[in-house]
Image: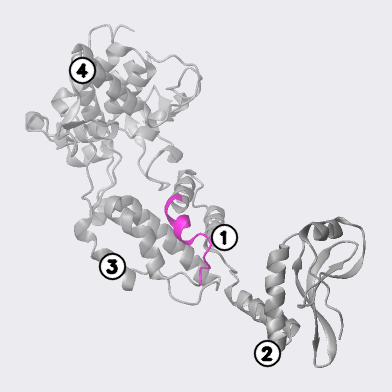
């Protein structure tokens, strides 16, 4: 009977692993644990006899597995031999099974990759040729809402339940944004189906189970709020307060109100867009919300608007710029309004510019006005006010002043008048109303 060597001590094993010796070294005991050393590695193995043949089965690398764990696995393999199983064959069969399962679960088309493909496809198709804001919004929504849930999932394995996890919170709290997000995700899956990355139907299909669930959230949806606007009667007070500040951001807010235009168009306005002879300002397509090529983008400038431009120093191609000659961000108007309201709270030198019809749910106090609401809603309320009934402003001309399109397709087909003279009259009267409290200093520039 062969002699059984005592188990090697841990300290001696460490010396053996670090040594440059090569070969197969028995580690003692009755389980057949050995250390196989080559020029490049040292591994624990079990030496055993199966069906009359001596065999070796690798347990693990000595740098990755402890001596204690190696002895446990060696005992496990020795029990397999006792039960008539070949450890090497068992490991080989398990490895093949794992490889087969891995092939089944391999993610060929992860959502993030298909999303990038879809975004590039849209960009190449000219979806963002007029503005890159849409591309930035798409990426931001995906990173914020979609990726935390389905970023690394294969598009073929994503279900309506996964989409519900993404849309549930924004659908209740941010319905307008959720609608855009839903459209973007739906577009990704339409693209995936087109490319045959997915064979099932689109999981964002509102005619399916997802639509039923989301419709049940309708009662929980917050009603879309209007942009806070100043009462048109108080607009002259705002214009006066802004003018007295004598800052570019304040002048920028005044100009946006005098022209009843959107924030982006004013902030990015360039001097070349102004025709002093015709007294017009033509907004380029890239700066307009409406991306139709032949849309109306002409603003007729009042004397007040033209006079305000004389107060602006020409330091750049852009009209309203900071000290660094860069266009202001969208928050510039909010900052001006905030500063005016802070002056009211501290010194009472200016009125409080708030929308009394909209209350803050937390404080139950009127919310501060916004540029969009004041420049556009206040203008429209002024044009349709009973006090101005005698002026009989043409309703279509008022809408054209706001650069709105006709909503009635038939009327738009037959009535194509531009109401140029009427629009000039409206803008001139609006300018006079807005600047009614400004001192003569304004006109003396």
Q: Which residue position is annotated with label 4?
A: 345
Quadrant containing the N terminus in the rendered view = bottom right
Q: For the point 50% across and 23% down, which residue is it?
A: 317
SS for callout 4: helix
First in residue order: circle 4 vs circle 3: 3
Seen in the image, is 95 located left or right of residue 314?
Answer: right
SS for callout 3: helix
Tag nearer the camera, 1 or 2: 2
Q: Is residue 282 visible?
A: no
Q: Camera-side residue: 27 or 427?
A: 27
Measured Cα–Cα span from mark 1 to mark 3: 28 Å
- Please tell me the numbered disc located at residue 213: 3
SS for callout 2: loop
Percent coordinates x, y for residue 158 in the rendering: 46, 69
- Please tell me the numbered disc located at residue 140: none
| Rendered image coloring scheme | one colour
Magenta range is 144-156
Measured Cα–Cα span from mark 2 to mark 4: 88 Å
Tag nearer the camera, 2 or 4: 2
Seen in the image, is 313 located left or right of residue 229?
Answer: right
First in residue order: circle 1 vs circle 4: 1
Q: Which residue position is annotated with label 2?
A: 83
Numbered marks: total: 4
Q: Which residue position is annotated with label 1?
A: 113
Q: Camera-side residue: 157 or 427?
A: 157
Residue 31, placed above or below residue 110: below
Quarter of the image for residue 146 reads bottom left
Percent coordinates x, y for residue 33 in the rendering: 78, 73
Q: Camera-side residue: 402 or 235?
A: 235
Quarter of the image for residue 3 reads bottom right
Percent coordinates x, y for residue 300 in the rendering: 31, 29
Seen in the image, is 130 located left or right of residue 207?
Answer: right
């Amino acid at each position: 009977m062969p002699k059984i060597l005592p188990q090697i001590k841990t300290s001696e094993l460490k010396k053996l692993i670090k040594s440059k010796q090569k070969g197969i070294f028995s580690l003692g005991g009755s389980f057949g644990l050995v250390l196989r050393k080559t020029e490049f590695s040292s591994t624990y193995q079990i030496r055993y006899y199966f069906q009359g043949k001596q065999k070796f089965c690798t347990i693990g690398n000595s740098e990755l597995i402890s001596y204690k764990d190696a002895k446990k696995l060696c005992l496990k393999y020795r029990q397999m031999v006792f039960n008539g199983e070949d450890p090497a064959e068992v490991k080989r069969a398990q490895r093949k099974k794992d490889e087969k399962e891995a092939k089944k679960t391999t993610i060929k088309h992860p959502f993030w990759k298909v999303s990038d493909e879809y975004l590039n496809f849209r960009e190449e198709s000219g979806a963002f040729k007029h503005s890159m804001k849409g591309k930035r919004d798409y990426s931001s929504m995906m990173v914020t809402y979609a990726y935390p849930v389905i970023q690394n999932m294969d598009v073929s394995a994503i279900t309506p339940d996964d989409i519900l996890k993404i849309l549930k919170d924004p659908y209740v709290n941010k319905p307008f944004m959720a609608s855009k997000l839903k459209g973007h995700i739906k577009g990704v899956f339409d693209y995936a189906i087109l490319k045959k990355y997915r064979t099932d139907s689109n999981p964002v299909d509102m005619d399916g189970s997802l639509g039923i669930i989301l419709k049940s959230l309708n009662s929980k949806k917050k009603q879309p709020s209007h942009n806070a606007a100043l009462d048109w009667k108080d607009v002259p007070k705002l214009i006066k307060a802004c003018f007295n500040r004598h800052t570019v951001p304040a002048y920028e807010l005044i100009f946006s109100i005098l022209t009843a235009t959107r924030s982006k168009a004013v902030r990015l306005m360039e001097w070349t867009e102004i025709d002093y002879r015709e007294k017009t300002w033509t907004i380029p397509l890239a700066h307009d919300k409406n991306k139709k090529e032949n849309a109306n983008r002409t603003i007729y400038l009042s004397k007040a608007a033209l006079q305000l431009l004389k107060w602006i120093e020409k330091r750049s191609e852009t009209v309203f710029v900071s000290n660094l000659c860069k266009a202001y961000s969208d928050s510039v108007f909010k900052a001006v309004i905030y500063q005016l309201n802070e002056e009211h709270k501290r010194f009472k030198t200016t009125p409080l510019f708030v929308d009394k019809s909209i209350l803050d749910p937390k404080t139950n106090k009127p919310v501060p006005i916004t540029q969009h609401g004041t420049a556009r809603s206040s203008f429209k309320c002024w044009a349709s006010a009973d006090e101005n009934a005698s002026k009989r402003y043409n309703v279509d001309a008022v809408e054209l002043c706001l650069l709105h399109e006709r909503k009635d397709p038939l009327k738009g087909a037959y009535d194509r008048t531009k109401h140029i003279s009427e629009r000039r009259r409206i803008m001139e009267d609006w300018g006079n109303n807005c600047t009614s409290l400004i001192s003569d200093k304004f006109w003396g520039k």
